Amino acid sequence: MNRSHLFPLRRAAALALCLLLCLHASAGRRARRVVLIALDGISAEGFRAARTPRLDALLAEGALSLSTRCAMPSVTLPNWTSHLTGSGPEQHGVTDNAWTVEKHVLPPVEHDAEGYYPSVFRVLKERVEGIRTAFYYNWAELINPHNRKYFDEASFEENDGYAGNYAKALRFIKAHRDEPQLVFLYSVHTDHAGHAHQWMSADYIRSIEEADSAIGTFLDSLKAADLYEDTHFLFLSDHGGRGYGHGGVTPQEMFVPWGIAGPGIKKGFTITEPNNTVNTAATVLHLFRVEQPLCWTGEVPESVFK
């Protein structure tokens, strides 16, 4: 074979190698920022019933599960701790809403010097240089399982308010736009609507729709600031409910929506593989290309990635 025949083969080989290198670089790229949009007490059936055009549009750009199972018991503090620590109550030891670092029954399998189980915030602070973390909440006990030294900003809003925290989150993201970020943006008002008026009542559904509108305004502000396209979003809830409460093992209490959108995520994808809320923190670490602690049990739902 003469050189004129070899040239096209060499060129094709070079192009193939370049493509492989580009794909490898893309696969290894860390997330720029991750925003966890967290609404308390949203059952899968409640999410289906509510009119949520803004969340629907966001999740149409990514992947959604309506059969994700929460940790047991289907109670608020154990479940949000499970979301943010990649582990169930049997590992982190948060078994009820009254848990504090000073008062609990089951010790965590691992803890820092102050007694706290390793959260996604701690792992990222220790492993990602320059990362900024924020925790916005309006249920006072929610922060108790977390060591506050791993937050750059933590803000509590009283009386089920959330608009002020959404505004603070936006300012935080803008202020640190050139740094990696993890932002947890939570509201409890949807859960309180279920307790006050019953799950699946008109008032409960209305609370979800009101949250959807506020989330849409927040997303529009990120777009206007050119901070939307390179952000990963996870939409999360901790449990559902039936009647005026939750804590049991019925599908209405145990099945919650779980969604993800952003760079590298399949669009319009329905998650059919088994999924659990303990997978949230594992997925966040995967986005930042950080290995999870050995004590965590969460897994990454690989099917959501392109």
Image (tube, rainbow, N blue to C red):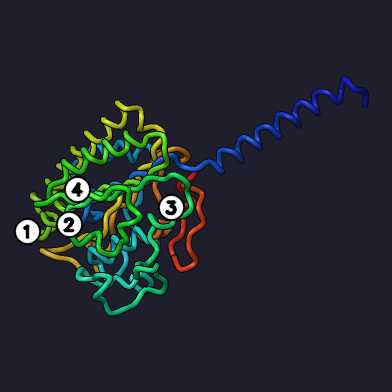
In front: label 2 or label 3: 3
Instruction: List the residue tagged with mark 4.
Output: 49
Q: Amino acid at mark 2?
A: Trp
In front: label 1 or label 2: 2
Compare marks 3 and 4 and give the one earlier in the sequence. Answer: 4
Q: CA distance from mark 1 to mark 2?
A: 16 Å
Compare marks 1 and 2 and give the one earlier in the sequence. Answer: 2
- The answer to whether the residue labelled 3 contacts the one labelled 1, judged by CB atoms less than 8 Å apart, is no
Instruction: List the residue tagged with mark 1.
Output: 196
Tell me: 230 left or right of 251. Answer: right
- Spot occupied by residue 61 in the image (x, y as percentages of width and height): 37, 37
Compare marks 4 and 1 and give the one earlier in the sequence. Answer: 4
| 235 or 160, nearer to the observer | 160
- Spot occupied by residue 82 in the image (x, y as percentages of width and height): 34, 63
Q: Secondary structure at mark 4?
A: helix
- The answer to whether the residue labelled 2 contacts the one labelled 4, judged by CB atoms less than 8 Å apart, is no
Q: Amino acid at mark 3?
A: Leu
Q: Secondary structure at mark 3?
A: helix
Q: Secondary structure at mark 2?
A: loop
- The answer to whether the residue labelled 1 contacts the one labelled 2, judged by CB atoms less than 8 Å apart, is no
Can residue 10 be seen at all in this image of the molecule? yes
- Which image quadrant is residue 252 in? bottom left
- Which image quadrant is residue 105 in? bottom left
Q: CA distance from mark 3 to mark 1?
A: 37 Å
Where's the N terminus, which quadrant?
top right
Compare marks 3 and 1 and give the one earlier in the sequence. Answer: 3
Instruction: List the residue tagged with mark 3.
Output: 124
> Does residue 175 lie above or below 285 as drawn?
above
- Res 139 label: 2
Q: Amino acid at mark 4?
A: Ala
In front: label 3 or label 4: 3
Q: Amino acid at mark 1?
A: Ala
